[in-house]
Image (cartoon, rainbow, N blue to C red):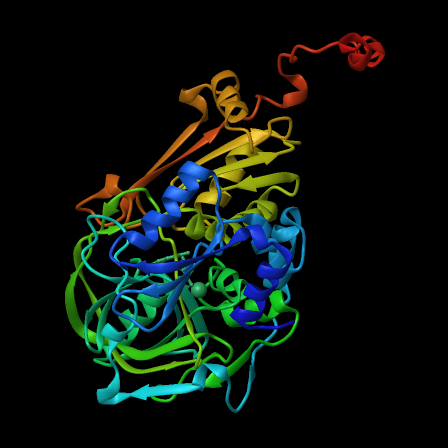
Amino acid sequence: MAQDFQSYIDRIKAERPDEFVTVSHEVDPAHEITATIMKTEQEARRRPVFLFDKVKGTDFKVMSNLHASRNRLAMALGCGPREMQKKFLHAMSNPIPPREINTGPCKDVIIKGADVDMRALPQIVHHGDDGGPYITAAISFAKDPDTGIYNCAYNRLMITGKDTTSIHLTLGKHLWEFHQVAAARGEPLPVAFAIGVHPTIALGCLAIGSIDEDEVAIMGGLFGEPLEMVRCETVDLLVPAHAEMIIEGEILPGATVDEGPFGEFTGYSLGAREREVVKVKAITHRKDAVFYDMNVGHLDHMLLSTIPMEANLYRAVRSMVPSVKAVRVPSPFTCFVSIEQRLKGQGKNAIMAVLGADLYVKRVVIVDHDVDIFDERQVNWAIATRCQPERDLIVIGGARGSDLDPSTSGDDGFTSKWGVDATAKPLLSEFTPRHRFPQDVWDRIDVDKILS
Ligand SMILES: Cc1cc2nc3c(=O)[nH]c(=O)nc-3n(C[C@H](O)[C@H](O)[C@H](O)COP(=O)(O)O)c2cc1C
Ligand SMILES: [Mn+2]
């Protein structure tokens, strides 16, 4: 399968021409890119991929909103939208290690040392209150300082100088842990960022699991072949050979800079704080590189992250409750699960599995398999009619969640978490029956005839 970004874009242009919009007039990277995408979504109810041909202050074209459609993501994975979770789980349990190749298109242009200028990149300001221009589609590649196992994640980078950015490391996540270990030794942590990648790489980097699970090999599992990687110019790391652009650098030990606020996936503008600093050592890119801008805080960002999150949560619940039916992450910090409860207590076990499997989940609701978790009215109905809060609500205090949860403001993600067991007690089969119709009556009513 082609592992580059452009050939995937060519497929969208050929197979889904209505989903590709080129903006040929000049746009201001301050707010206009994000506002154009969101106004199109709100007024025309469309979520195409956007290519901004002329962006003030830079030679790079900017592309955005690629991931704002489940169908487009499914196309990247070569499956239907309903098969994505299965495909993701298969890749997690069948990872394929990468293959190093000598060189690749991401090395067409190599800019090093004093020639590095982050100001030559698009200086995109997304929302009104943002603290500065941000790179929102940077996928970090770094190695565990002890084990050498790779870790990948998206990390927001605020451009702070000619060769510096800040980096947001969610407290307690894997890259933050690598940095803690390196910084305690007084060492910088080498890191490289890929910008503009095939959506399979974007999905793979968001896999949730142990720090010892290598996201690069999950990307291979998703491609069904090893990810082709090349060696960086200035740091000892491998990066995707076919990326549009690579930024090489290191996270400095002990240095911080003011960062944020930033309009985030929570729907809030927040997170202003002192954060770690990246010293940029090289930028390499394709000769015709398109700069990808994640339309952060909206569907481009949200749809992408929920697929890997849901796969991991399904895996976790299934290890505890084999008869799990479906898992969904409908909104930030929230998870809905349906199970076929065969034994008393499995609803509570499902709560424990979910809260133990993902740092970000703060609220989980478990329902029986007759409730469609893709319909929030049904979930609310189950909470209202099958729950006794005194008995069915679990609250865990003093846990770790997202430092971007505004309700933990001042406490940086130190949070309580809750689970709602909205399954029927003791079991659905013994619960008050739902109203229904005798099957023979239902079958003999001919709606077409009545309406004709
Ligand atoms: C567009 C986008 C931006 C993100 N920005 C950040 C960020 O700035 N900092 C961060 O720690 N996680 C960010 N995340 C979430 C992480 O990439 C995600 O939780 C990842 O799985 C963490 O990797 P880990 O589990 O290997 O630690 C972002 C995710 C997306 C999709
Ligand atoms: Mn990881």
Q: Measured from the top left, where is residue 57 in percent x and y?
A: 25, 69
Q: Residue drawn at (54%, 52%), measured in percent from left and top?
A: 19
Above or below: residue 70 compared with residue 252: above
**Residue 315 visible in the snapshot:** no
* Residue in the picture at 43% in, 79% down: 148
Instruction: Tell me where residue 162 sits by quadrant.
Output: bottom left
**Closest to the observer, 365 or 13:** 13
- Compared across the picture, whether 209 is left or right of 451 comes to left
x and y percent of residue 326 in the render? 60, 40
Q: Quadrant of residue 237?
A: bottom left
**Which quarter of the rendered picture does the C terminus lie within?**
top right
Looking at the image, which is closer to me, 80 or 39?
Answer: 39
Going 39% across and 49% down the picture, which residue do you hit?
37
Q: Give the left or right position of residue 271, taking residue 102 as reference.
A: left
Q: Quadrant of the N terminus?
A: bottom right
In the rendered image, residue 351, in percent from the top left (x then y), is placed at 48, 38
- Residue 52 picture location, percent across and down: 39, 61
Q: Quadrant of ligand 2?
A: bottom left
